Image: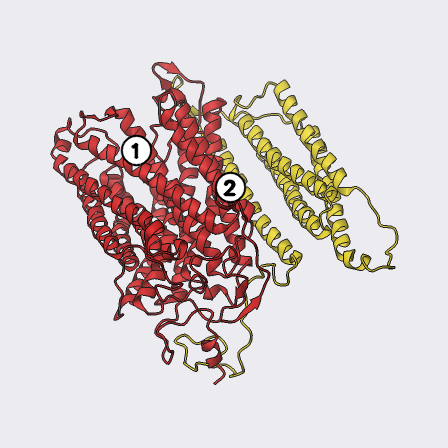
Chain colours: A yellow, B red
Amino acid sequence: MATYIPTRPLDHIGHDQKPPSPPQGGGDDGRSDGYPNYGARLRRARLGLICAIVTVSMVFISLTSAYIVRRGLPTYDAVKQGYFRDWGEVPLPWLLLAINTAILLVSSITMEGARRQITRRAALAPVQSIPGVSLGEEKNFPWLAITVVLGFGFLLGQWLAWGELKARGFFVNTNPDSSFIYLFTGAHALHLFGGVVAMIWAGVTSLLHRPVEARRIAIDVTAWYWHFMAVLWIYLFALFGFMR
Amino acid sequence: MATSATVHAHAPEGFIRKYIFSLDHKIIGIQYFFLALTAVWVGMFLSLLMRLHLIFPTASLPLIGEIKPEQYLSLLTMHGTIMVFFVLTTAPQGGFGNYFLPIQIGAPDMAFPVLNMLSFWTTFVAFVVMIAAFFVQGGAPLHGWTGYPPLSAIPQAGPGEGLGADLWITSIAIFCLASLMGALNFLTTTLDMRAKGMTLMRMPLTVWSWFITAILGLLAFGVLLSAGILLLLDRNMGTSFYVPLVVVNGQILGHKGGSPLLWQHLFWFFGHPEVYIAILPGMGVTSQILSTFSRKPIFGYKAMVYAMLAIGFFGFMVWGHHMFMSGMSPYSAFAFSILTMCIGVPSAIKTFNWLGTMYKARIRFQTPMLYAIGFVSLFVSGGLSGPFLAQPVLDIQLHDTYFVVGHFHLIMGVAAIFGMFAATYYWVPKMFGRMMNEFWGRIHFFITLLGTYAIFMPMHYLGIAGGTRRYSQYTEVAYLAKLQPIHQFMTYAAIITIAAQFIFVINLFWTIFKGPKASDNPWEATTLEWTTATPPPHDNFGGVTPVVHNGPYEYGVPGAAKDYVMQTDPAISTAGAH
């Protein structure tokens, strides 16, 4: 064993002269004992989700910035030789949007129910596999299915809201406000639809008899994404409310 | 080497799963590399056409014919776009980052291999859509790589602004999605998949550079995506986000009240970090190579890390310096100017540390090292004109001249390309198991270095003399016609430099198929990719997981048997017990 001195001393050298502790830091690649390391996979999936949430947030932050800037801009009228504001407020179908908001909030609660249900199942899975051990009758409340239905309900509600706007004569190019309303709600609906697809995928995995831990990861990440969608919608709702 | 036994992952069999739709980060890295190599030849060919047109404006070129002014603008647009997105963003991060980030942190693959594959193929689709713009009615768009509206937002504005511009924006939007997927993967991999002992401050500076680049990408590309969607809506749905009341050919269009400046803000909020997305990986690989070939630890490792973080941080605060000409408030311009010059501080720290690393070193002047030194040279040459342009008063004089073209080509274009060349010569032995030809590598280096200076340095003089950029002909204006000899010189330099790139490509492909076999650690470097087989096995470390004990640049360690200590060598750690 070489006994040479490092050019750049390690942290523990010079402090206590104790034998070196095992190297710190670093991640786990999830393949240490031949079994998939679900804990590491879950952590990784959540980390990936945080990155995805950051980037979706950047999309909506930039759209908000465009919204605020565009709202404050005057436009030049060559005939009148002066500036005027062409913003044009859109009367929103507030009642419909409030019902939609309520649907989305309830769906967030049911999604949390699905997440906790699968977390409990994943935790109890090793115990249940012991012969003779029973945990009583397992509750199979269909949290996920209800959330999918509510998700589609929200999308249907948004569709109705767009129909209502059209009926009132506001199309995507009617005025800047209506452009932004369609843009924000459309972008949110698209992202939310992604969440519904993820939920359906998570449901399909349970039919495919995938390990409960794998299903748990899918549902856990989808649930956090779904909560983010609810928060994002409340933000948009507030933005529309405060900006008029 | 301390290791722990792990299950050996099996490589997929069958050509399609192994080489086309591969989940292996190494294959995906090589796919990105060759995509960028294809793109750079397309981009370079376009620049050759532009340079030929500038000195022979009425000449009829073989197969192409005479280049009309609007075609010149199409060439300019597509050259910039292809080079910035599909070369400068794709090769350093998607190519080398994909291949070496997991290996350098001791991971078997990226965190999300399927997403990684998806990310590459999405980039590929974006490239195909971009190239398709050449072949549709009207041809490629005219609006430059920055796509300023109203030109970019009005299909009637000119040939190429119809379907060609739609394809251009769509391609950029697809590219944004691909880059976001890539950034997400890079961040998760770096944060969560490091081997035991690979603390953040033991990561090679290459890993730091890819990590910081991924953060910038994650924050920046979403903004460009939003901006692109607004532009598509303005073009196709009749909205007025960017387009004010416009009259085209005597006809009033339906838009009113939009602000072209809104696009500029959103675009440059992405665009300036994009400059660092292009250059940071080059900084990382330069640090790595300078240390390895100087046989000395990198001078000021932590300072290098913090400098890169500072560059990334300030990169988000300076977008306004691209818009001094837009009539912004002098107070805003002042703030952007000061913040821009602040970036000079971490940049200078990096340059100082690179020079400090080489100071009094027994330098091995092999091709990767030559390119790394070339990177430093170009970074300084291109960087020094930055503080000039950061002054609003000077910028108003210089902004629409060749001075700016010279500045960004030196620092963002060629310096980043030199980073890629350095990385190619350095890592091809590991990637393909064969050594590149040293003699031809040096010939390639010297012609390319002198050639790039010959092309881009005169642009600064041209700009100071009032040589405007973006014009397709300079012969018809008296004072510009006098500058024509400079254009002739630059074109001949470009022809020679482009010809020299054949040396590189022939050397590369000859090496891949016929080159002499490389050992596992031909450069006697210390980082983890040099501890594994050449080329690395499917799971990178052949069924073992490396354990890291040292920093990445332990060269010239007193008392050691060799002048370098691998990151996995426990000897330094145990020295602490004595």
Secondary structure beneath disc 2?
Answer: helix
* Number of the label disc, if any, that sits on residue B16: 2
Pick whichever, B520 or A150, lies toward us. Answer: B520
Query: Would you name the residue on which mark 1 appears?
Result: B76
- Viewed as shown, does residue B445 lie left or right of A35? left
Count neighbours of disc 2 (C-alpha within 10 A) and say few if under 14, some if 14 to 19, many if 20 or more. few
C-beta proximity under 8 Å, tags 2 and 1: no
Chain of the residue where label 2 is placed in the rendered structure: B
Query: Going by the image, does A147 lie left or right of B349?
Result: right
In the image, residue B552 lies at what x, y percent?
42, 66
Callout 1: few (<14), some (14-19), or many (20+) C-alpha neighbours within 10 Å? Answer: many
Q: Is residue A210 visible?
A: yes
Q: Residue at x 52, y 59 (%)?
A: B107
User: Three-letter amino acid code at disc 1?
Assistant: Leu
Amino acid residing under circle 2: Ile
In front of the other: A189 or A132: A132
Q: Is residue B202 above or below residue A214?
A: below
Rendering coords of residue B292 (x, y %): 34, 65
